[in-house]
Image: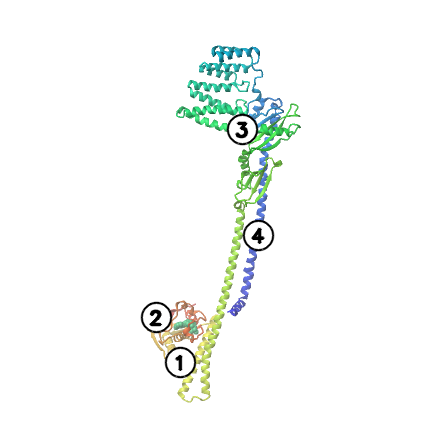
Amino acid sequence: MLENLKLAVKRQKKLIIIFLLTIFVPSISLSIFGIRAIRNERFRMAKQIENEHRRAAEFLKSQISAQFKELGSILQNLAQSTAFLQRDDAGIKNLFETKLDENPLVDQVFVAFEKEEVWFPLFQPIPSDILYSSSPASEGIQQSGQKRAEAYEFKDRNYTRAISLYRSLADQSPDTNFKAQMESYVSRCLEKAGDYAGAIQNYQKICEVYPDSTSLDGMPFSLKSQLQIASCYQKLGELQFSLQTSLDLYKDILNMRWRLKGAQFKAYADLVEGAISDILSENQSNLSFKDYNEEFKQFKNLYQERCEQWLVIKDIGQNIIPELRGEKALSTYRPIPLQYHKTLNERTFLLSAVQILDSSETRPVGLLGAKVREPYLIEHVLPEAIENSQFINASNVAISHLSGKILFGGRNTSEDPTTATEFFEDNFPPWKIEVFRSEGEALGVLDIKRNFYFWTILTLVIVLISGSVLISRTIAHEMVVLKLKSDFVSSVSHEFKSPLTSIKALAERLRDGKVKDSDRMNQYFSVITQDADRLIRLVRNILDFSKIEEGKKEYEFVETDMAQLVTQQIESFRRSEFAKGLEIQIRISEDIPHLDVDKEAFSQALNNLLDNAVKFSSDRKEIEVNLKKENTSVFIEVRDWGIGIAPPNLDKIFDKFYQVRNTLQQSVKGTGLGLTLVKHTVEAHGGRIVVRSRVGEGSIFSIILPTQRKEK
Ligand code: ADP
């Protein structure tokens, strides 16, 4: 086995070398090259992505910074306007309302003049509009007159006299705050006298004539009057009027009609809100009140918003401005806007501020600043910038506060590698921009290339495997052939040996004169002749086979009487020693035509079939030969009742050297060439050979020849 393998490999050396050189080595080197190329490509792509991401991060940073720069220059322009230089509060407020109110980036604007309270022009009314009573009713005549009127009102409950006294006091004074105060007392008396309609009228007059007057404690008379009007309407049973008045008042408070302090704002707003919700809840079933609910709800939301703003401006006023002032933002002239950030109560303050200069335009006298809306930057500016940047999308950007709080986006998996990180100049805003590569997205392009390499390598591997299989099969086949050849050699030797041994023994006996009887002598000669014939047939078979293998076998076709040829052949076979004890039956039809055949080759083919019929016969020593014509074919059938052939072997028996291994027939030797030659001869005559057989029952070999041989 091992010897055969070695021999087979040796014989196929050329093929193996060709395989190694043309398939194996190129495949392996291409695979290695492919894998390395994938790795290089990966590295290159990663670098490229990194560069693109860095550029994208820089772009985002520039877009955000640009917003602050723009805001800074707007503020700078405003601070340099005449309204500021001349300290015109109405002009300043107007300026802000036209230039900044619509700016989505700006949350609050503040103006902080030296040593003055901070003013939020977009949130509060003009400071100079608010006329706090500088000279309250403290003058002597007024004071005594007021006391007398109050005595009529509270002690005597003489409201008519009290009213006329209050009115004359009002007429006499030039002070609008005092006048407004007296009028509010008049209304109070009317209310007490039960004249609610009169009281309402008088309160309305106060609102119209003294809209901005305030009491000593800073309470605006118009606000107080409206509160009272609502209450009077309620007393009159005019609930709808009362509600409408309260809603109007609520709206005015929320829209900062008066310059209130935070606590005042909250107290009045709560008061009015309470009054409104009382009326609404008590009159739920009243359909005409239904419409107010929606309006009220909107105001309540606005109230929440305002409360937030109050907190913001409180923080700015109390914590940030003192800090900014402390940072000497006002001590020296600085032409560049100031950027400032601070986190208070989890609220981020991003501020941009510029100096307000005095009329000489050299000395800073105050600060003008704006608090930026961080959510606007995150929710609008950033997504837009991401959209405009070529190389990234929102899924691979994360923005976090320097404290670590995530402001925008985030990673899906912590394994996504960060490709670029950017911080802002002076850490303003105090953010970190991170761009990372999300697995699916980033490798998309790479996948196509990788696929290409993958399929190439796969193809090479398949080629390699197929090549190896082919080589192994060739070697295996070579081994089979080697085995067949060695079997053939031993079979042939055996085939030669037995007749030669017999010839030698008989000839020696004859030579030594040991056989005297002439009959016996004749018998000896006949056996020697038979054996010699057998040897001749054997040699002829081998020579024919060798000629066929070399493609040199030639046939000589001669018109032949087939019936005669077959009969002669069988007769000669019958006479042979080999056919002793055998019964051969011949059946020949009458219409057998003459055919062009090579007599010698054909006789040998028939002989081979008869030989096999005898060799593989069993107890029933009988052969039947049938020659018949059907349509355009002549059939020569050789039938035996021998051991038969198993179906899987039926195809193989015509292969060269093939012999069915059968333990029972170990004694029967052959060369495995007989049927190969028969098949070749028959096919050379334009015919074919067919076998039908059953194990244990016998076989029928049929040579089928066409009546008209086609010339090749
Ligand atoms: P050989 O007879 O020299 O072995 P052949 O080519 O004539 O070679 O036959 C091949 C094989 O076919 C034989 O070894 C035998 O096993 C089988 N065979 C041929 N003829 C018959 C038959 N008439 N009955 C059974 N087996 C047969």
Q: Secondary structure at mark 4?
A: helix
Nearer the camera: disc 3 or disc 2: 3
State the separation of the CA atoms marked 3 and 2: 119 Å
Looking at the image, which is closer to me, 267 or 601?
Answer: 267
Q: Residues within 10 Å of mark 1 (few under 14, many from 20)?
A: few
Q: Which residue is mark 3?
A: 309
Q: What residue type is disc 2 on?
A: Lys
Point out residue 55 in the picture as x, y percentages from the top left corner: 59, 41
Q: Residue at x 52, y 24 (%)?
A: 265
Nearer the camera: disc 2 or disc 1: 1
Q: Quadrant of residue 336?
A: top right
Q: Is residue 424 left or right of residue 476?
A: right
Of callouts 4 and 2, which one flags the residue occurring earlier in the amino acid sequence? Answer: 4
Q: Which residue is mark 1?
A: 577
Of callouts 3 and 2, which one flags the residue occurring earlier in the amino acid sequence? Answer: 3
Q: Which residue is mark 2?
A: 629
Q: Is residue 475 left or right of residue 286?
A: right
Q: Residue at x 45, y 82 (%)?
A: 503
Of callouts 2 and 1, which one flags the residue occurring earlier in the amino acid sequence? Answer: 1
Of callouts 1 and 4, which one flags the residue occurring earlier in the amino acid sequence? Answer: 4
Nearer the camera: disc 4 or disc 2: 4
Q: What residue type is disc 3 on?
A: Gln
Q: Secondary structure at mark 2?
A: strand
Q: What residue type is disc 4 on?
A: Ala
Q: Residues within 10 Å of mark 2 (few under 14, many from 20)?
A: some
Label 1 near label 2: C-beta < 8 Å?
Answer: no
Looking at the image, which is closer to me, 346 or 17?
Answer: 346
